[in-house]
Image (cartoon, grey):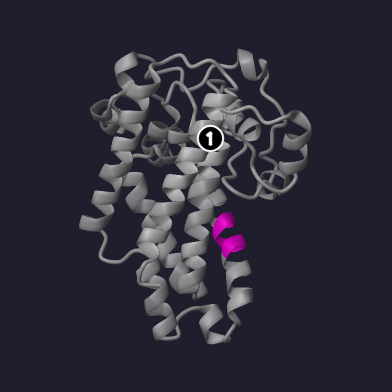
Amino acid sequence: MDNQTSIRLVFFAVGLLLCGLWEFVSPRKPLTRNKWVRWANNLGLVGLNSLCLALMMPILAFGAAVYAEQYCIGVFNFFAVPLWLNLILSVILLDALIYFQHRVFHSVPFLWRLHRTHHADQDIDVTTGARFHPIEILLSMWIKVVAVFLLGVSPVAIVLFEIILNVSAMFNHSNAKLPYRYDQRLRQLIVTPDMHRIHHSVIEKETHSNFGFFLSVWDRWFASYQEAPEKGHQGMTIGLPYFRRRQEQHLWHMLTQPFRNGK
C-alpha cells in the first residue's frame, strides 16, 4: 500500500466536505464564534500536527505495521492470523485502546492539560474532531506504534483503522442534526454527534463521560455513558469554564493552553 497516505487524505477531504455540508444544511446548534476563524485555526493545527509527525517521529503506525509483518512481530503475526480476522480484531482492539487512552488523558493532570486544547473549542463542529495539541498527537502516535508491535496489526488494518477513526471523529463532532430515531438506533453501535457532544459540555461530569470515538459499546460497558446533557443540546454550553476569550480559538493560544493557568 505505497499510496496509503493519498488514500487517507482522500477520505479525510471527503469526510470534511460531506460533514461540512451536512452542518450547513442542517445545523444542530447556533455557533457562538466566527466559523471561518475557527476553521482556519483548527485546520492550521491539523497541518502543524502533520508536520510534527513527519519531522519528529522515527516511525509511524503504518511503518510499524509493515516492519512487524516483515519480521513476524506481534501476536497476530506469531499465530499467523488470517488477514480478515486481523482486520476485525485490529479495528476493535485499537478502538478500545483509544477509548482507554482518552479516559487516561482526562484523569492524569499533565495529560489533561494537553487534552484540554481539544475541549477549549467554544463550538463543536467537524473541525473540532481533529483539533489536538501537537504533544498529544505525538504521544498518541507512540501509543499506537507500541500497540501495533504488540498485536502485529496488518498494514491494511492500520490504514483501515485510521480511516475509520478520522471519519468517525469528523462525523461525531459534526454540528449537524440527526433525526432522533436514527440517532437512537445508530448509537447502539457507534458514537453519534448527539452522544459525543455531551463530552464537550462545560459541566464537568458531562466532560468526563462518553469517551468513545467510533464504537459506543465501551462507554456502556465501562460505566461512562451519559444519555443526554443536563440542560439539553440547545441549552448546553460547549467548551471549558476557562479559556473563554475569543482569542483562545487562535492557533498560538491553542498551542500555549497546556502551559497556562487552568484546572
Q: Name the foreground residue: 36 vs 115.
A: 36
Q: In which quarter of the image is residue 207?
A: top right
The x and y percentages for residue 1 are 40, 72
Q: Name the foreground residue: 143 vs 54.
A: 54
How many circles with numbers are drawn on the protein?
1
Residue range in magenta is 91-96
Say which residue appears at 25% left-offset and 65% top-offset.
58
Q: Quadrant of residue 224?
A: top right
Residue at the far left: name it.
55
Horizontally, is 138 left or right of 190 in the view? Answer: left
Residue 83 appears anywhere in the view: yes
The x and y percentages for residue 183 are 72, 35
Q: Quadrant of the C terminus?
A: top left
Horizontally, is 90 left or right of 142 in the view? Answer: right
Say which residue appears at 41% left-offset and 16% top-offset.
33
**Would you name the residue on which mark 1 appears?**
173
Per the image, is 158 magenta? no
Q: Residues within 10 Å of mark 1 (few under 14, many from 20)?
A: many
Horizontally, is 7 left or right of 22 in the view? Answer: left
Q: Name the foreground residue: 70 vs 168.
A: 168
Query: Hey, what amino acid is under mark 1?
Result: His
Say which residue appears at 42% left-offset and 37% top-offset.
112
* Above or below, 241 relative to 209: above
Per the image, is 95 magenta? yes
The chief SS type of the magenta part is helix
* Above or below, 162 relative to 171: below
* Above or below, 241 relative to 7: above
Say which residue appears at 45% left-offset and 85% top-offset.
72
Q: Name the foreground residue: 175 vs 122.
A: 175
